[in-house]
Amino acid sequence: MEKWADVNPRNDSGDLLCIATFLPLKSWRDLIPFFRMSLRIERQLKRSPALVRYSLRTDLPHKRFWTLSLWNERGGVNTFVSAEPHATAVRRFEKWAGPGAAFVEWTVADKAPGWPEALEKLQTPTFYYQAAG
């Protein structure tokens, strides 16, 4: 399943910062806390002035989740990542993360990417999460 949400229109025709994440959970017991945190983060996303749009993709039977977000500028991403509840989610996800959990970021100048490009970019991520022992 995929879901797209437009949050803020583009301010100009400048570059978009794109961020994709792959979030597999290692345990079914983490699913409910993960969903609760995801809902809180989605509310935070909708209040982020630098966010253009975001998408969520799920494979529930395999406990795998992906995000794709498009941003007008880096400062807005930094503000979002360091604010609650996202800051707590990052700390918790270090315990929840299954094998291959990662994120990647890149910029585009022409058109907003879709899922095929994001999934390809995730093959060579910027960062792999290291699950806590």
Image (cartoon, grey):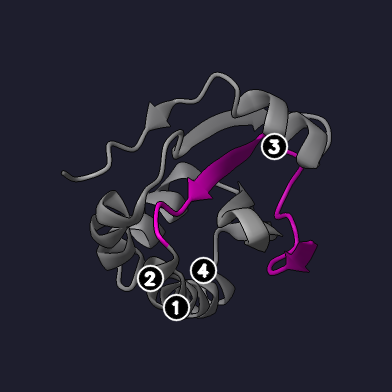
Mark pair 2, 1: CA separation = 7 Å
Expressed as whole percent of the image width and height from the top left, the position of residue 28 reads 44, 66
Q: Residues within 10 Å of mark 1 (few under 14, many from 20)?
A: few
Q: Quadrant of the N terminus?
A: bottom right
Mark pair 1, 4: CA separation = 25 Å
Q: Earlier in the sequence, mark 2 or mark 3?
A: 3
> What SS does tag 4 mark?
loop
Q: Quadrant of residue 121?
A: top right
Question: Which amino acid type is marked by label 4?
Answer: Ser
Range shown magenta: 1-27
* Mark 2 and mark 1 residues within 8 Å of each other at the beta carbon: yes
Mark pair 4, 2: CA separation = 30 Å
Q: Which residue is mark 4?
A: 48
Mark pair 2, 3: CA separation = 42 Å
Expressed as whole percent of the image width and height from the top left, the position of residue 54 reads 67, 58
Q: Earlier in the sequence, mark 3 or mark 4?
A: 3
Is residue 52 among what the camera can see? no
Q: Quadrant of residue 89?
A: bottom left
Q: Which residue is mark 2?
A: 29
> What SS does tag 3 mark?
loop
Question: Which amino acid type is marked by label 3?
Answer: Gly
